[in-house]
Image: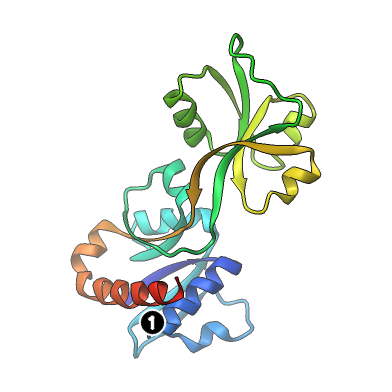
Amino acid sequence: MLNVALPKGRLGEKVYDIFEAAGFECPSIRETNRKLVFENEQKQVRYFWVKPSDVAIYVERGAADIGVAGKDILLEYEPDVYELLDLNLGKCRMAVAAPADFRDDENRTLRVATKFVNIAADYYAKIGRQIDIIKLNGSIELAPILGLSDVIVDIVETGTTLKENNLSVVQTILPISARLISNKASFQFKGTQIEILLCQVRNQVEQHD
């Protein structure tokens, strides 16, 4: 059995559509129920729904052979996995956003609020800017409004939430999309199975481009 960790939600459903079209269907996943694990004996594949930010952990630790995680997660947590393919799904960008009246005074430390501490630290280190990182877990947009931070580093999809909070993107750090990842040991021991799946999935992705 090939164990596949899918991110719960809209992205995971789109990913499953690709896997199904690639010949790795599991009809029970389409049924309305609360189950988290689904398998198709005939196709030798087992899927399970996982919180998106946990997929990389399941794959890294071998509970899943392969999975789908956002590039943001891979950069932030640097799990010890192989990145096999860009699925061209869940496209967005990691960006710096600030209030309209923001002017960067380079004589003082820039206060940056973010969930993505490592990505932010790495970005500002590269441009040689001194920063004070404020780690938050939710509603990052609130930080500059209430004067907790000067800017935020966050994922931007449409930019609507930023606009509604009078913030705008001042810098794009990098583009983000969903990636197919593999456990390193599984890639060795179930290599043939993974290669076949990878090849079929790649064909599907290229057809949709």
41 up-or-down from 9: above or below: below
Rate crowding at label 1 as few (under 14), some (14 to 19) or many (20 or more) other CA atoms within 10 Å.
some
Out of 141 and 106, give the one closest to the viewer.
Answer: 106
Seen as rendered, the residue at the extreme top is: 107
**How many numbered dots are placed on residues in this image?**
1
Out of 44 and 170, give the one closest to the viewer.
Answer: 170
Say how the picture is coloured.
rainbow
Q: Residue at x 29, y 74 (%)?
A: 199
Where does label 1 land, which residue? 22
Residue 159 in view:
yes
Q: Residue at x 47, y 34 (%)?
A: 118
* Image quadrant where residue 205 sits: bottom left
Residue 135 in view:
no
* Image quadrant where residue 11 sits: bottom right
Indicate the position of residue 29 as horizontal and vertical percent values.
53, 82
162 up-or-down from 2: above or below: above
54 up-or-down from 137: above or below: below
Quarter containing the N terminus: bottom left
At mark 1, the secondary structure is loop
Indicate the position of residue 187 as horizontal and vertical percent values.
24, 63
- Asked if residue 142 lies left or right of residue 8, the reply is right
Q: What amino acid is at disc 1?
A: Ala
Indicate the position of residue 108 as horizontal and vertical percent values.
61, 11
Indicate the position of residue 195 as horizontal and vertical percent values.
24, 72
Quarter containing the C terminus: bottom left
Q: Residue at x 75, y 31 (%)?
A: 100
